[in-house]
């Protein structure tokens, strides 16, 4: 035992250095990914604005471009690397838990290019999933080159995932906390050290690319201190966020099951989804894409009841359909949109009915981000830290904690498994089926996807 401890201690500096390399490279890659996605989003908006001058031909052009980009992303996944589909977080979780093989190096370029095509075309997907999986794949490459053990590889994959999330959301603490709370589900010293080092290195690497300051991703107005008299609005938001989170998880998994059973080719389905998104983007450009603009409006308290209700309905369906399109893209950003809009809706209704018992709509939008995330992912600490880091606001921590607890209780009472647990089981099952097909020499379509 003493010999094992000594060997571990002697290998610690090189292991930490490997984690730092993983984090730095992940930050550079994910930072450039975010930079190009922002450029693609601006380009899509400019294209729609220009195309409106051409009426019907312009409409058809926008639809064709969005459909083609989405179809190309699906083709890349389907033909080149099936494990690059979807968020990527479930795949990383399966690797960290030892339930799936690390995967091939080509996951990285396919995820990068496919993510640019799918998210850039306007699908309601987030950049965090691809960033997390790219960080995990970078860790696989680094661990392989440095000849680290299989156990070290799994820890480094978790560290790379932390760096990816930290970069995607400009939230280094949330990146580390999410991996420890959700992916590895433990806080042992070795894993914690690697995760935090990689997260910090990734944050630094991204800033080298983005030349960014330490400002937060979202702005919130000055929010007053909450009072006990306003507790009913917090309780209401917690219950509603719990219910909507359960419904969202169910809808995502149902859509994936339908897609798995469908005989329509994957690329054809993706073309149809891209065309629909292009059409929506033509008529209502702000509604498509990752949705950071919608989250920002909610955090400023801007909106009317009917408009917010309609927006929640559209984004709910759009998020589910986009995720089932078999292209790279994450769930975090769409969740933040729904959570913030839900909080805004509760705030607007509350101020119309009982203003003295309701927090400011902007404050409830902030709380809704964390509560809805907690309901779907079942990671309350990450939800609270993420919402706080992304906004820089700490005044709503107490009601946020209460709303997250209630949302989590509702999800547990309804026996809804966390979304990433469900997707990880699906990913591990797909990996086993793909391995079985490969062993038997089958050359058909891979059994499924990464989730």
Image (cartoon, helix red, strand yellow):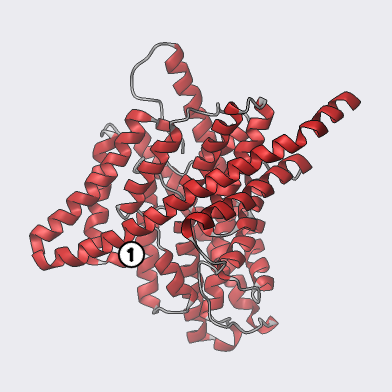
Q: Quadrant of residue 22?
A: top right
Judge whether 166 appears above or below 283 on screen: above
Depth check, front residue: 389 or 370: 389
Depth check, front residue: 97 or 47: 47
Place of residue 183 in the rendered image (x, y in percent of width and height, measured from the top left): 62, 43
Q: Residue at x 28, y 31 (%)?
A: 263
- Horizontally, residue 90 falls left or right of residue 405, namely left
Q: Quadrant of residue 75?
A: top left
Q: Residue at x 54, y 31 (%)?
A: 141
Judge whether 353 appears above or below 3 on screen: below
Q: Secondary structure at mark 1?
A: helix
Q: Residue at x 55, y 87 (%)?
A: 355
Depth check, front residue: 121 or 314: 121
Mark 1 Cα within 10 Å, few/some/many (few <14, many 20+)?
Answer: many
Place of residue 347 in the rendered image (x, y in percent of width and height, measured from the top left): 51, 78
Depth check, front residue: 292 or 424: 292
How many numbered discs, if any?
Answer: 1
Place of residue 252 in the rendered image (x, y in percent of width and height, measured from the top left): 43, 47
Place of residue 379 in the rendered image (x, y in percent of width and height, measured from the top left): 63, 53
Judge whether 169 appears above or below 185 on screen: below
Residue closest to the far bottom = 356
Instruction: Give the position of the N terminus as an image quadrant.
Output: top right
Q: Residue at x 59, y 88 (%)?
A: 356
> In the rendered image, which residue does mark 1 sit on?
287
Residue closest to the far right = 2
Residue closest to the far top = 440
- Horizontally, residue 114 falls left or right of residue 221, namely left
Residue 416 visible (yes or no): no
């Amino acid at each position: 035992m003493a010999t094992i401890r000594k060997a571990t201690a002697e290998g610690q500096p090189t292991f930490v250095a490997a984690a730092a390399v993983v984090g730095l490279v992940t930050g550079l890659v994910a930072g450039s990914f975010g930079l190009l996605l922002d450029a693609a989003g601006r380009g899509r908006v400019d294209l729609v604005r220009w195309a409106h001058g051409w009426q019907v031909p312009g409409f058809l052009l926008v639809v064709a471009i969005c459909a083609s980009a989405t179809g190309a992303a699906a083709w890349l996944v389907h033909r080149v690397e099936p494990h690059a589909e979807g968020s990527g977080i479930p795949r990383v979780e399966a690797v960290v838990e030892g339930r799936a093989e690390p995967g091939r190096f080509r996951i990285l370029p396919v995820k990068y290019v496919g993510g640019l095509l799918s998210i850039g075309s306007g699908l309601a997907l987030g950049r965090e999933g691809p960033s997390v999986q790219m960080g995990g794949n970078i860790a696989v490459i680094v661990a392989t080159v440095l000849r680290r053990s299989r156990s070290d590889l799994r820890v480094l994959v978790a560290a790379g995932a932390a760096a990816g999330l930290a970069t995607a959301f400009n939230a280094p603490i949330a990146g580390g906390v999410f991996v420890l709370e959700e992916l590895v589900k433990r806080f042992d010293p070795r894993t914690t050290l690697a995760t935090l080092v990689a997260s910090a290195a990734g944050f630094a690497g991204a800033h080298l690319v983005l030349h960014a300051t330490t400002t937060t991703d979202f702005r919130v107005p000055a929010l007053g201190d909450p009072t006990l008299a306003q507790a009913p609005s917090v309780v209401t938001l917690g219950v509603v966020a719990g219910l909507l989170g359960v419904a969202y998880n169910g809808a995502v998994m149902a859509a994936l099951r339908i897609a798995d059973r469908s005989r329509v080719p994957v690329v054809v389905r993706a073309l149809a989804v891209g065309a629909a998104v292009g059409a929506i983007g033509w008529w209502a450009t702000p509604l498509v894409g990752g949705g950071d603009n919608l989250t920002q409006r909610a955090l400023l308290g801007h909106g009317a009841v009917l408009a917010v209700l309609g927006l929640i309905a559209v984004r709910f369906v759009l998020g589910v359909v986009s995720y089932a399109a078999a292209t790279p893209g994450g769930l975090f950003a769409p969740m933040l949109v729904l959570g913030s809009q839900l909080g805004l809706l509760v705030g607007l209704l509350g101020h119309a009915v009982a203003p003295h018992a309701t927090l400011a709509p902007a404050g409830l939008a902030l709380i809704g981000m964390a509560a809805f995330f907690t309901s779907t992912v079942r990671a309350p600490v990450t939800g609270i830290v993420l919402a706080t880091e992304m906004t820089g606001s700490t005044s709503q921590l107490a009601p946020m904690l209460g709303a997250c607890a209630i949302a989590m209780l509702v999800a547990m009472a309804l026996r809804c498994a966390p979304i990433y647990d469900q997707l990880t089981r699906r990913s591990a099952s797909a990996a086993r089926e793909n391995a079985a097909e490969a062993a038997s020499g089958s050359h058909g379509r891979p059994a499924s996807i990464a989730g």
